[in-house]
C-alpha cells in the first residue's frame, strides 16, 4: 500500500480536528494551540525527523511527544498522539496549515503579502487593510509586510488566490511595452 501524500494527510487530519473542535465550541482555542504547535516544529526543524527516525527508541520519542502535548486540549493532544502513532509527525506543519486555511475561510480572513517601496505608516496600513477587505470580501486582513525599494512606489499585494500589482515599476514597464511596439 502506498503512503498518502502530505496534502491528502493534512486535509484529512485538519478536517477531522476542525469539525470536532467546531462542534464542541473549541475552534478558537484549538486554532491558537495548533499555531503554537506549528511554531514548535518550525523552531525545531530536527524534531519531526527525530520522531520519525531510528536514532531514538520508542520511549524517548513518546517522551518528546508528551512534552509537546503538555498543557494541550484533548483535541490537540489526541491529534499529536495520532500523528505520532501513525508516523505522521513530519506532516504536522502541513496539518496545521490546512487547519488554518479552514479557520481563515470560516472567519473570512485573508493573509496578504504586501510589498511597498517604503515602510507603511499605521494610517496607510489601515487604509490598505480596509480597501483589501472590501475588495476581497474579507472580514479581516492579515498583512505580511515587506519593503522592496526596487518597485519604486505603489504596492504589490499577493494573496493565496491573486496578485494585485500597483507598483510604479510595473506601470513603467507597461508604458515601455506600449511605446516599443
Image (cartoon, grey):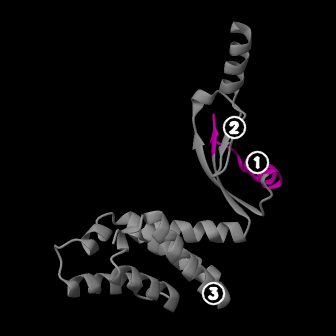
Query: SS of the residue at dot 1?
Result: helix
User: Relative to residue 104, is residue 33 drawn left or right?
Assistant: left
Q: Earlier in the sequence, mark 1 or mark 3?
A: 3
Stretch of the chain drawn in magenta: 114-135
- The residue nearer to you, when weighing 130 against 18, is 18
Prevailing secondary structure class for the magenta stretch in the rendered image: helix
Q: Quadrant of residue 70?
A: bottom left
Q: Are marks 2 and 3 in contact (CB under 8 Å)?
A: no
Residue at 74% across, 13% down: 178
Q: Where is 109 relative to 165, above or below?
A: below
Q: Residue 46, percent across and down?
A: 28, 65
Q: Residues within 10 Å of mark 2 (few under 14, many from 20)?
A: many
**Marks 2 and 3, how far apart at CA:** 37 Å
Kindly identify the residue that appears in the image at 60 percent across and 79 percent down: 18
Give the structural element (helix, strand or loop) at label 3: loop
Q: Are marks 1 and 2 in contact (CB under 8 Å)?
A: yes
Q: Residue at x 69, y 58 (%)?
A: 110
Residue 155 - label: 2
Left-right relation of 137 to 157: right
Circle 3 packing at 10 Å, graded few (<14), some (14-19), many (20+), is some
Decide: is 136 above or below 51.
above
Above-or-below relation of 169 to 63: above
Residue under label 1, please give it. 128
Amino acid at each position: 500500500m502506498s503512503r498518502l501524500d502530505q496534502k491528502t494527510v493534512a486535509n484529512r487530519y485538519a478536517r477531522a480536528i476542525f469539525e470536532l473542535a467546531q462542534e464542541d465550541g473549541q475552534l478558537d482555542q484549538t486554532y491558537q494551540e495548533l499555531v503554537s504547535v506549528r511554531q514548535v516544529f518550525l523552531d525545531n526543524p530536527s524534531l519531526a525527523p527525530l520522531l520519525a527516525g531510528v536514532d531514538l527508541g520508542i520511549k524517548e520519542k513518546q517522551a518528546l511527544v508528551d512534552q509537546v502535548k503538555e498543557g494541550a486540549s484533548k483535541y490537540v493532544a489526541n491529534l499529536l498522539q495520532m500523528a505520532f502513532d501513525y508516523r505522521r509527525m513530519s506532516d504536522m506543519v502541513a496539518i496545521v496549515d490546512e487547519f488554518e486555511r479552514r479557520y481563515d475561510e470560516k472567519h473570512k480572513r485573508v493573509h496578504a503579502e504586501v510589498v511597498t517601496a517604503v515602510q507603511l505608516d499605521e494610517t496607510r496600513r489601515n487604509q490598505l487593510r480596509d480597501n483589501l477587505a472590501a475588495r476581497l470580501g474579507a472580514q479581516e486582513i492579515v498583512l505580511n509586510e515587506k519593503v522592496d525599494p526596487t518597485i519604486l512606489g505603489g504596492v504589490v499585494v499577493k494573496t493565496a488566490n491573486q496578485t494585485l500589482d500597483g507598483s510604479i515599476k510595473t506601470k513603467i514597464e507597461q508604458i515601455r511595452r506600449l511605446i516599443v511596439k
